[in-house]
Amino acid sequence: MQDKTMDKPATFGLIGFFLGVLSIVIILIQLSAFFEPQAKSSGTTIGEIAAEIKLSAARAFAGEPAPEPTPIPKDGRELITIAALCVAGIAVALGAVGLYRKEPHQLSYLAVGIGMSAFVMQFVFWMAILMCGFVLLVSIVKNIDSIFE
């Protein structure tokens, strides 16, 4: 007589895996959109930042008040990123539910791993951008004396 055991289907793990892959794809598209060619060159942008620092320093020395900041136009990038990170969180939760229900472990582990990697990828990318921006601002401030010439 044959002994057959019916394995539970990995429904939560499978759904979590697909959601995790979806979140990674969305985040990769968002990060690649960051490096699209802009209307202005990087040198122009850096020059505008240096000019704003110069004008701000000149106003501070003259005792003039700072002008009102211009509002930044809204776009949907932030909402898409938040939605992708929420989908990654749902993928992690579904992977954990799949592990709790003792479904086959492979898809549940992948769901948790891919969902967490979406968070880590977003965090590491923005930390790298923050460090590069800090280095750029330090180099501008360091050379501020040559801007006043």
Image (spheres, grey):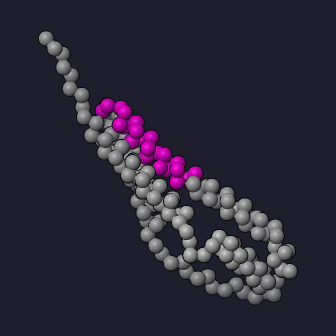
Across the whole image, how many numbered discs are drawn on residues? Answer: 0
At 55% from the left edge and 53% from the top edge, which residue is drawn? 123
> Is residue 113 within the magenta segment?
yes
Which image quarter is the N terminus in? Answer: top left
Q: Reply above or below: 63 against 106.
A: below
Residue nearer the viewer, 104 or 147: 147
Q: Reply above or below: 21 against 134.
A: above
Q: Reply above or below: 24 against 55.
A: above
At 38% from the left edge and 52% from the top edge, which residue is drawn? 22
Residue nearer the viewer, 44 or 59: 44
Please state if 55 lies on the left or on the right of 95 as rendered.
Answer: right
Please state if 4 lies on the left or on the right of 69 as rendered.
Answer: left
Q: Is residue 49 visible?
A: no
Q: Quadrant of residue 72?
A: bottom right
At which x and y percent is residue 34?
A: 53, 63
Q: Quadrant of residue 54?
A: bottom right
Q: Is residue 135 visible?
A: yes
> Is residue 102 within the magenta segment?
no
At which x and y percent is residue 35?
A: 55, 63
Which image quarter is the C terminus in? Answer: bottom right
Q: In the image, which residues are magenta?
A: 103-124
Residue nearer the viewer, 109 or 146: 146
